[in-house]
Image (cartoon, helix red, strand yellow):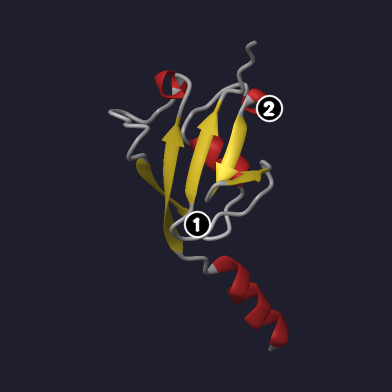
Amino acid sequence: MIATESKAMFTNKKTVTVTVKLFSGLANGSTLTGHDPGKGTPVQVKDGTRLKKLVSQVGLRNISSIVYLIDGERASLWSRLRDGNEVMCLKPSSGG
């Protein structure tokens, strides 16, 4: 009985909405149409989805050269997403 309960716990993940904001021209190569970086685009994912899957879902390439922030905090591609998260993606820049 415990095995059935734990299996149900992992298979019934609810769908949540996160807001994706793409900066530094990243929207040009994405699947998000009409993206406004100031407002972001709501995207639905399963609760606990890793950032890497979301990035793939929105069509970003060269994912290792992008900086990710979740709710203003630096995040890794292995970070898990929760309802209401704001995900910001940008290319690092250099200058002098």
- Please state which amino acid type lies under the numbered disc 1: Lys
Classify residue 96 as left or right of residue 71: right
Viewer-proximal residue, 9 or 61?
Answer: 61
Quarter of the rendering occupied by the C terminus: top right
Viewer-proximal residue, 31 or 20?
Answer: 20
At a point 46% along the width and 60% down the height, the residue shown is 83
Please provide percent x and percent y for residue 3: 71, 81
In the image, which disc is placed on residue 64?
2
Classify residue 92 as left or right of residue 60: right
Residue 38, quarter of picture: top left
For mark 1, give the secondary structure: strand
- Please state which amino acid type lies under the numbered disc 2: Ser
Quarter of the rendering occupied by the N terminus: bottom right
In this rendering, the answer to whether 85 lies above or below 1 is: above
Q: Nearer the viewer, mark 2 or mark 1?
A: 2
Classify residue 40 as left or right of residue 49: left
Please provide percent x and percent y for residue 60: 52, 27
In this rendering, the answer to whether 35 lies above or below 5 is: above
For mark 2, give the secondary structure: helix
Please provide percent x and percent y for residue 86: 47, 48
Q: CA distance from mark 2 to mark 1?
A: 23 Å
Residue behind mark 1? 46
View extreme (bottom): residue:
1
**Crowd around label 1: few <14 · some 14–19 · many ≥20 (10 Å):** some
Task: Tell me whether the residue at label 2 lies in contact with that at label 1, contact meaning CB atoms closer than 8 angstroms.
Answer: no
Viewer-proximal residue, 68 or 79?
Answer: 68
Residue 61, quarter of picture: top right
